Image: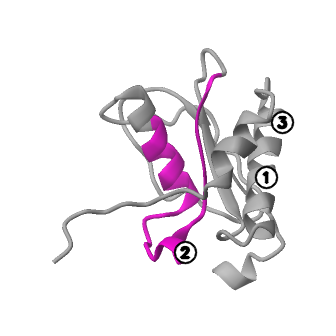
Amino acid sequence: MNTVLQIAQPAWLAGFIAARALPRDDAGRLSEVLALAAANVARGTGGPFAAAVYDEATGERLACAVNVVVPQRCSLAHAETMALALAQQALAARGIAVSGPLRRAAARQVLADYAAGGGRVYNGAVHNGIRDHG
């Protein structure tokens, strides 16, 4: 019986984010998330969904993630849950409080709400390919 769970984001993600300037406002953050979702589809590494967590006070990018449910064979690997988990690890926090409005494109619902911490979550999807990925 397997007792270890590992869920990896695509190898290209870190370089993609490192090459981008830090977004300064909500529109820029949502644009970044939509670019991630589009890149995930274009590169064939997962579904057309992405999410990011930014520190509300400083604007720091805490985490970004894309949907990797199918390639990782794990129903927990939705972009928003991955971004929240990665932000939680980055902050070494017990949880993340989602404050401010959740942004969404298309009809993607955020499935998780976490307590204790601080940040703003941006969740987006590109329309191209949504039907193919539920």
Q: Residue furthest bottom?
A: 132
Circles 2 and 1 in contact, beta carbons < 8 Å: no
Which of the numbered marks, if any, corresponds to residue 71?
A: 2
Front one among 59 and 92: 92
Question: Does dot 2 land on a helix, a strand or a loop?
Answer: helix
Q: Is residue 70 above or below residue 89?
A: below
Quadrant the N terminus occupies: bottom left
Nearer the observer, 131 or 23: 23
- Looking at the image, tell me whether mark 2 or mark 1 is earlier in sequence order: 1
Q: Residue at x 74, y 75 (%)?
A: 130
Residue 88 at x, y percent in the picture? 41, 36
The image's mark for residue 116 is none
Q: Is residue 128 left or right of residue 14?
A: right
**Residue 89 in the image: x percent, y percent?**
39, 36
Question: Alpha-carbon distance for marks 2 and 1?
Answer: 20 Å
Q: Residue at x 72, y 63 (%)?
A: 40
Disc 3 target residue = 27
- Decide: few, some or many residues near mark 3? Use Cα within 10 Å; few <14, some 14-19, many ≥20: few
How far apart marks 3 and 2 lie (CA) works out to 30 Å
Q: Residues within 10 Å of mark 2 (few under 14, many from 20)?
A: some
Viewer-proximal residue, 64 or 99?
A: 64
> What amino acid is labelled 2 in the image?
Pro
Kindly check if marks 1 and 3 are in contact, taking CB atoms under 8 A apart as contact.
Answer: no
Q: Residues within 10 Å of mark 1 (few under 14, many from 20)?
A: many
**69 in the magenta segment:** yes
The numbered mark at residue 34 is 1
Q: Which residues are magenta?
A: 60-87
What's the amino acid at mark 1?
Leu
Image quarter where the C terminus lies is bottom right
